[in-house]
Amino acid sequence: MNTARLTLRSFTLDDAAFIVELLNDADWLRFIGDRRVRTPDDARAYLTQGTIAHASRHGFALGAVQRSADGALMGMCGLIRREGLDDVDIGYALLPAYRGQGYAREAAAAWLACGFERYGLQRIVAITTLDNLASGRVLEAIGMRFERRLRVPGHDDDSLLYAAQAPTRRR
């Protein structure tokens, strides 16, 4: 999938070094959590058992966010089915050098539209930590609205739940 500035594609095992970098970024560890991915072999296992398996099961998953102009791998974004949530969840994370430039908003908006249009989802949610204000702003910018606090299985603290409904179709 392409946007004005981005290529959103599936991860491959060739992305292992990038996954090590992204999953060990200080903000990833703070806001998302330690996935214990330290080596390229760990990353290949993470990709194989995580995003690649998820995509084969559901048809969608978290994937690479790449800048179209130069091919730079910037982060990940996509749709996932998460234990403890009734609806499909949108998730994203970018390396520090690419934050604050609208890339997360652009990628998340594309995946939100794709979820409604291609996959026929009627509702898509997202969760953030209580203190991840930047992520909340991205979600609101793409049309999601805060609903409530909740505790997601596997998380030690409460999260904030945002949601968006599929647009109504005109006849």
Image (cartoon, rainbow, N blue to C red):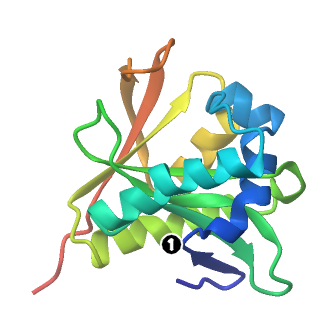
Q: Quadrant of residue 132?
A: top right
Q: Quadrant of residue 60?
A: bottom left
Q: Is residue 51 above or below residue 22?
A: below
Residue at the top extreme, as displayed: 156
Point out residue 139 in the picture as x, y percentages from the top left corner: 53, 49
Q: Quadrant of residue 12?
A: bottom right
Q: Amino acid at mark 1?
A: Ala
Q: Which residue is mark 1?
A: 110
Residue name at image x 83 percent, y 59 percent: 98
Residue name at image x 29 percent, y 77 percent: 117
Residue at the front extreme, as displayed: 41
Left or right of residue 72, residue 54 in this image: left
Residue at the right extreme, as displayed: 97
Counting the numbered discs, the total is: 1
Left or right of residue 93, residue 60 in this image: left
Which quarter of the rendering shows the C terminus?
bottom left
Left or right of residue 121, residue 30 in this image: right
Residue name at image x 28 percent, y 62 percent: 58
Secondary element at tag 1: helix
Point out residue 128 in the picture as x, y percentages from the top left corner: 54, 33
Q: Is residue 65 above or below residue 16?
A: below
Residue nearer the viewer, 148 or 72? 72
Point out residue 89 in the picture as x, y percentages from the top left corner: 38, 48
Residue name at image x 38 percent, y 17 percent: 151
Point out residue 91 in the picture as x, y percentages from the top left corner: 52, 50
Q: Residues within 10 Å of mark 1 (few under 14, many from 20)?
A: some
Q: Is residue 33 above or below residue 50?
A: above
